[in-house]
Amino acid sequence: MIGLSKLYCGSVEPADVLRYGSGRLPSHLLQFSADKKPVVVWNCTRRCNLRCVHCYSRSANRQYPGEMTTQQAFALLDDLAAFGTPVVLFSGGEPLLREDLLELAGRAIQLGMRAVLSTNGTLIDRKTADRLRQVGLGYVGVSLDGMREVNDSFRGAGGAFDLALAGIRNCRQAGIKVGLRFTICNRNAADVGDIMSLLRDEDIPRVCFYHLVYTGRAATLMAEDLDHQATRRVVDLIIDRTAELHAMGLPKEVLTVDNHADGAYLYLRLLQENSPRAADALQLLRMNGGNSSGLGIGCVSWDGSVHADQFWRHVSFGNVTEKKFSEIWTDLSNPLMAKLKDKASHVKGRCATCRFLDVCAGNCRVRAEAVTGDLWAPDPACYLTDQEIAAELSQDT
């Protein structure tokens, strides 16, 4: 994740400790410390009440076989807590369709981890929001991929936008921190400005803009991804609107996800603007370390399979119903797991010689593989020019 609001506006944000580290917490709780322990995305169910066109898990509204039992889930959470995992993100499918979700979230919290929820928001009525608050859920991220017409087209269901917005309002009323999740492509890029306005109008404190990753159903949307110039325009718009809200005294936590070129691009923009924040931004980006799949973030599927992140479903390193996550994650006898711990040493082409390699770590490996067939090839979604990545280093220090 690239914290645009933090880097561009200097905002102090709750997740800074995870992205940049802090001496106030022990190292095993810091995702980007030298002793990295992963934030774990747990797709606790594959079932979903919607059928989104870009779903990485290809979910549908049916029961899938092999879903982990409650007792198996407890064993996973016990191991994650002992391992030092700071955050468990309950995802799906639609996690609210799992009957024991609140019991599992409560267990994670009791064990000292932060529990957060990734949801389409359509099932969060007032009663559900109150129950989420009572269990102590730290955050709810609601997926909106455009305004009403565009979002409902993405979701494959009329009325999904209005139900999700009602869910957001119910979370706000219950006192739960809630944010938006938006995956950018050609069919919804024109709605980015309206989403920023929605943050202001609905008093929503956070938004994550995701770049498209070509896995699951999203593999069919590859041709709808933004070209490099369009990506630059959208990122500039997000930065501009973030700064505008900050100047109005309405600061929002704004992040981009799954394209670490955004960090280098923001730094270059700060340099061009002669901003005094440029050097600090570069330092924070280097502390963040770039793409953290297989290192600072991991994924467990509904059936217990362990992946480098939620987009790597074609590669499993083991199954937590047979072996502890902590053992799977630290088993470097798997050549790919070993390489993911040090991606910068294995990337090829322009990535290998890029001056921002310590900021990006080679960007999204799954996207590179989807387009080229080579896991270590340059990420085709990197929109930085050859001149930008090869410029003299003297201005960075």
Image (cartoon, grey):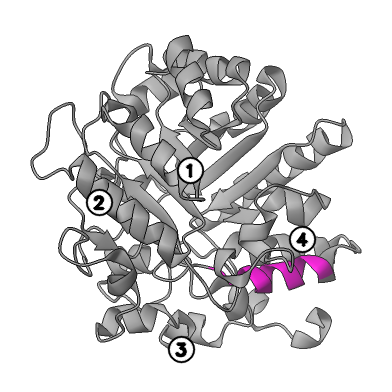
Kind of residue indicated by mark 3: Ser
- In space, the residues marked 2 and 1 are separated at their CA atoms by 20 Å
Q: Which residues are magenta?
A: 280-290
Q: Earlier in the sequence, mark 3 or mark 1?
A: 1
Name the front one of labels 2 and 4: 2
- Residue 304 drawn above or below residue 165: below
Q: Up-down: is 25 above or below 300?
A: below
* Secondary structure mostly seen in the magenta stretch: helix
Would you call the spot at circle 2 few (<14 residues within 10 Å), some (14-19), or many (20 or more)?
A: many
**Residue highlighted by disc 4:** 269
Residue 23's place in the image compared with 92, above or below, is below
Crowding at label 4, few (<14), some or many (≥20) Cα neighbours within 10 Å?
A: some
Which residue in the structure is indicated by mark 2?
301
Alpha-carbon distance for marks 2 and 4?
A: 38 Å
Q: Residue at x 41, y 55 (%)?
A: 40
Where residue 379 sits: x, y (%)?
A: 43, 69
Residue 322 in percent (x, y) is at: 15, 64
* Quadrant where the C terminus is found in the figure: bottom right
Q: Residue at x 48, y 66 (%)?
A: 296
Q: Which residue is mark 1?
A: 109
The label nearer to you, 3 versus 1, is: 1
- Assess disc 1: are there few (<14), some (14-19) or many (≥20) residues with their C-alpha within 10 Å of its C-alpha: many
Q: Nearer the viewer, residue 289 or 136?
A: 136
Quadrant (top left, top right, bottom left, bottom right) of the N terminus: bottom right
| Separation of residues labelled 4 and 1 (CA atoms) | 40 Å
Looking at marks 4 and 3 on the same chain, the residue that comes earlier in the sequence is marked by 4
Residue under pointer 3: 345
Give x and y (percent) for residue 161: 44, 17
CB contact under 8 Å: marks 3 and 2 = no
